[in-house]
Image: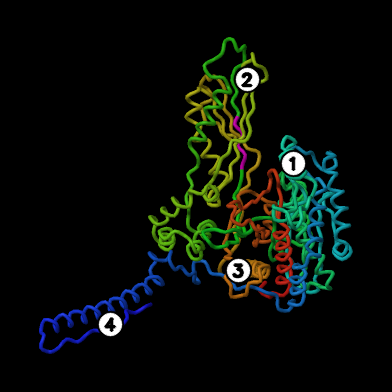
Amino acid sequence: MVLPQKRNLTVPSLGSSESLHTARKATYRSIKLWCLSICLACVWTFATWRWDSLSAFNYRPVEDSSCPQTNTLIPRQNLFFWTLLDDELRTDEFKNRAVRWLGGAVQVETETFDNMDPVGEDSRWENRAFFHQYLQNAFPRVHSTLELTKVNTYGLLYVWKGYDVALKPYILAAHQDVVPVNPDTVDEWAYPPYSGHYDGKFSRFCERVWGRGSSDDKSGLIGVLAAVEFLLEQGFKPARTVVLSFGFDEEAGGKYGAAELAKYLTERYGRHSFAFMVDEGAGFMDQYGSVFATPGIAEKGSVDVDIEVATAGGHSSVPPRHTSIGILAALIAHLENNPFKSHLERDTPMYEFVECLGAHAANLPVPLRKAIKRAKRSDKALKKIEESIFQNPVFKSLAGTTQAVDMIRGGVKSNALPEQAFALVNHRIATTSSGKATKIHDRDLLAGLANKFNLTYMAFGEQVSDEDVPSKGRLTLSSSTVLEPAPVTPTKGENAAPYQLLSGTIKAAYNAHRSLTDDDDGVIVAPGMMTGNTDTKFYWDLTEHIFRYNHLNTGKTGNPLGSAHTVNESITADAFLEMIQFFGTLILNSDETKAF
């Protein structure tokens, strides 16, 4: 603060009363201005530190009970191995080794299709054997030290036995398979989709490994094996048993891979026998001027609803007013015009994440920050938050039940009336809802149209319309299976030790990779959710502490999935190295904790 300079006033002679009066006024004015400056400076200082209305000018994140942060967790007993890992990751030699590992894995095609028959009946599974051979050659110490069991032929289960049997083991999971590459898009790739190409240090693309699976999920699988291989090379021997569980059909639901692996683990170790599990999931990204890591602590449920309309056939030269396809189109339009209502509800993972934004996001709009602070007790403030964050379609999708009409078919010939028409609607069920509630919503929503078109209506095995009334056709809703929303992993209280360990590990890996000190608040860890389902749905009986997180740096893209499932799937070498650092740090921290 700059104070007004002292003025050199000329003191008039005592004989001049007018001059004396003028001098006094000038002196008083100067004193007033000086006092006013001090007052304004004090008010400003107080305001910028204490008033939410001015926080955008001078916001300083402080510890907030609504989103407490765990301290950075650097291994102590295993500090020697952690330091070796940190030093090695900074070398060009290890970087080249890492990109060769990942590039080689991408080169082995392991596509999974939705219509594959069981293992042993479909030759398309057989490429997994080539992938297994690649892993054996690439990671010799893993395969000479860890116990390997192949479950249902292609499921890989590695057990790294610890010497302290009193410690609960934990699971690091990933999947071997990838989504297919659309042949029509091959020419759109910067490099062939199964080249595993590394574009090098001087690439304009920031040193990337290219190809299907480089992001989802071979980077996770190879990242885990790379960390284990390095620690074995340094002579590390775990006290706590580590289980690596790698399914081979996650992209088609996991019923032959992860489902069988989880069944095997349950039979071998028993229910609730693992301290925690980490599988593929989110990473970290910039949001409102701060970096947030969002391990998934929950997953939405899912159900596919089949809609079938059946009407009389005949020659198309004498058509009814509405064919089965026309009626189906009306039903679909009605569904899409009446989506599920999404709401931000307290005591949900999404609300916990929003609280963390309010506590720690540096550039969060001032009105939104104020609303978040009041929302615990104010429904009006909660509604204001909802209106703001739901402008982001990802947030809105995570908060509520969604619907997507993904498949449709009907008709066999241009001059024949379609006797049947089908559509499939995929629902992702909110954590606060259920499969039953989702089915009831669809049943009730379409009842009016069934009546309008004079259709006999059956929904999920229940007769909705009167069977005895003559009709012009039939409307049937059905679903084969329902996946209920996943149990929510504890993040607070006495049972949150695994979450705290994961949070501290995330901070340690993030800071170390950037040479930040422990005092640097480089990354905020906040509870998150997955937009889709993972193999973790089969492991619910093994542990209540399930995290969907792979420490992928998605920067400022706004897309938590990065380039997965699309043309030019890739990952930067730097991001992949940091994933290895995360998995190595997690293994070392988990080994020495006595919190569980």
Label 1 secondary element: loop
Q: Residue drawn 57% across and 24% down?
A: 474
What is the C-alpha distance between the residues marked 4 and 1?
81 Å
Name the secondary structure under disc 2: loop
Q: Earlier in the sequence, mark 3 or mark 2?
A: 2
Neighbor class of circle 1 (other Cα within 10 Å; few <14, some 14-19, many 20+) is some
Query: Position of 512 compared to 362: left or right?
Result: right
For disc 2, the marked residue is: 419
Q: Total marks drawn?
A: 4
The quarter of the image holding the N terminus is bottom left
Which residue carries the number 3 mark? 495
Q: CA distance from mark 3 to mark 4?
A: 68 Å
Whether the magenta-drawn stretch holds residue 306 is answered as: yes
Identity of the amino acid at label 3? Asn
Please tell me in which quadrant of the rendered image residue 404 appears: top right
> Label 1, label 2: how many angstroms apart (C-alpha)?
33 Å
**3 or 4: tag closer to the N-terminus:** 4
**Which mark sits nearer the N-terminus, 4 or 1?**
4
Along the horizontal axis of the image, is 104 left or right of 474?
right
Secondary element at tag 4: loop
Q: Which mark is residue 7?
A: 4
Q: Nearer the viewer, mark 4 or mark 2?
A: 4
- Of badges 1 and 2, nearer the viewer stands 1
Q: In front here: 289 or 489?
A: 289
Residue 427, x across and y down, in percent: 58, 42
